[in-house]
Amino acid sequence: MNGTSAPIGNTKVRPTDRSPLRHLDLRAVSAAARVESRSRQRYLPPVSVFRWWARRTESVVGAVLDAYSLEHPGVLTVADPFAGGGTIALAAARRGHRVYAQDVNPWATEGLGVTFQLPSPEQLRVASARLEALVSADLASAYRVGSDTMIETIRVAVGVCPKCASEIYLYPQGLVSMTRRIDSGGSDGWEVCPVGHMTLGRVDRRRRCHCNRIVDPVASYTAGAQAACRHCRWRGHISQLLPFMWKPILVAVGTPGGRRIRPPTEREVELAESSKWKPTLDLGRIPEGTETRRLLQRGFHEWEQLYPRRQRHMLELLLASSIVASAGDQFVELALRFAVLSSVEFAGYMSRWDSRYLKPYEAVANHRYQPTTLVAEPHVWGYQGGGRGTVSARLAGLIRASEWNLRELPNRTVSVRRSRRTTPLTSDTTIVRGSAERIGVPDETFDLVLTDPPYHDDVQYGELSQLFRVWVGDHRARLSGDVTVGSNACSAGGYQTRLTMIFADVKRTLKQDGHLIFSYANRDPDAWTAVIGALHDAGFVAAGYTIVHSENETDHSKRGKRSNTLDMLIDVVPKKSRAKVFRPATGGGSAQTSFLHVMGRWVLRIGELEEGWESELRNEALATDYLAAPQQANAAQ
């Protein structure tokens, strides 16, 4: 046991009132989470069916479910009112429990519906082959020139100097692209001088361009989003150069051993920019928002502007062909369409080209839209059945997920509902779209509510999912019932109010001996006061907490930064139940661990909070090394 338990008040404690968190082997759970977080689709293949952000690991939620079963043996009814990417629903279903999954975001609920109702692997293989046959001639017409097939078309943003009208090539740095991955022994690459002249050479040394300027592979040309004209010495923010032109400067073409990086031929440039591509879908305007603002500031005002015309044309063709390839099977059609829709995140004017590892990145990185100036338009289907984010890769992921479903979720009945009318559960898995302010089941239905609520303002799920939703005509900027601070639907003050309403309905749906357990992490003390206050006001009392590993600390977006890589698991029960509180051991650990233990002491006071507790919590939080150190550093500058 990794802590101690102690009673609250004088109420007699039944064994079922004790926190299941006391059963967790924290070292083993955290070690497993570290491994899983580095390659989630290998450990839980269905997560590759659709894109979601901030998924928890099955290692953690599965361990919680197993621990809960020790206190409550048998088949449980488990609910997740913030279902999101579906890890909790999948983990519970894998263990044979009855599952209720609800989310306000249609991208999440439709994705979960597809995930739980995937056709058989053989059906998907046949349909994938049929889809490829339907579009193969068009794919060749779009990406093949002579004997070469373009896998990626790499473009650079070009602006016009506001002073002298010269073209300014906005290369982020001197190295544009290696010719071979650096981890495979690559040493040569395409580089540019400050003016934008591109040459091929070794990337471990500086040299002179034919224009006599220094070519330095590590030189930064647009640091801080600043640009300079080498002709008239103008300097300014790159936004002053809008609208950009996007010029193809390299192509990756398929070879028997992989790929070759070279400048495009005239015919390849003509093909990439041809007016023969005639996409017809109106994807709508990009609304003003916390995350979409990044797109607007870079000159993207319509969603379709994120895509080269060729890419949009081919995506539309694949969506239409999915209907024919499905041969009238509704579930096959949905699966094929989701494979195509999931690939739209590799938008050709947004997908960053990794110059050292020779691969494109998603338009959303680290839960943010990340517009850049060196981008890659992918071959939408993929070359020889591969490629990051391509439709063929997505289809292969669906087949792996289907094989997993057959093995791990045999013979489960599934119900997908758009209505939250109060209805008894009749299926093994029930998926419902709608705000968790109202959960569509009778009182005292759930043994356990295990969830992962929005982390205050950390991830704008509604805005990020619009990149996908607009392709099916869902142009709505706001989702009614969204509880993410900063969204069009929820203010900072409204976050606690909404959570209180949600937790109150959760309490209604819990059985008398049921628990609400969820993971939470945030650096903002106000986020913690909102969550703790909402639980208290909704009528819960603390049963315990503990701390586990949650995120991949080796991810490029987290290395060397004070990022959240740990989660607190919070366990509460309806106030009338009372509980024997589990207190984890608190010795040692990182600054983040110490901070979370400070917050944990306040979690244990849920149900017994006194007036003025919010300011006390805030003061204690700001005094921790985890929050104080950055403030002290800023003060010293």
Image (spheres, helix red, strand yellow):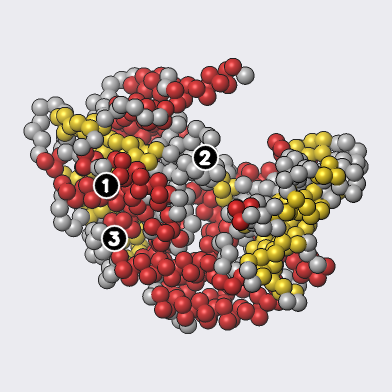
Marks 1 and 3 sit apart, C-alpha to C-alpha, by 13 Å
Q: Are marks 3 and 2 in contact (CB under 8 Å)?
A: no
Amino acid residing under circle 1? Val
Q: Earlier in the sequence, mark 3 or mark 2?
A: 3
Question: From the viewer's perspective, is 413 left or right of 334?
Answer: left
Amino acid residing under circle 2? Lys
Query: What x and y, as percent, mark residue 444?
Result: 19, 49
Marks 3 and 2 sit apart, C-alpha to C-alpha, by 31 Å
Of residue 274 and residue 407, the one placed in the foreground of this image is 407
The residue that label 1 is drawn on is 64
Query: What x and y, as percent, mark residue 223?
Result: 71, 37
Where residue 432 is drawn, which disc sits there?
A: none
Amino acid residing under circle 3? Arg
Of residue 157 and residue 448, the one placed in the foreground of this image is 157
- SS under mark 3: helix
Q: Does 156 appear above or below 597?
A: below
Q: Is residue 612 something that shows in the picture?
A: yes
Residue visible at 35% across and 52% down in the picture: 58
Where residue 94 is drawn, which disc sits there?
A: 3
Q: Earlier in the sequence, mark 2 or mark 1?
A: 1
Q: Earlier in the sequence, mark 1 or mark 3?
A: 1
Q: Are marks 1 and 3 in contact (CB under 8 Å)?
A: no
- SS under mark 1: helix
Residue neighbourhood size for the residue with mark 2, other residues' Cα within 10 Å, grouped as few (<14), some (14–19), many (≥20): some
Where residue 558 is drawn, which disc sits there?
A: 2
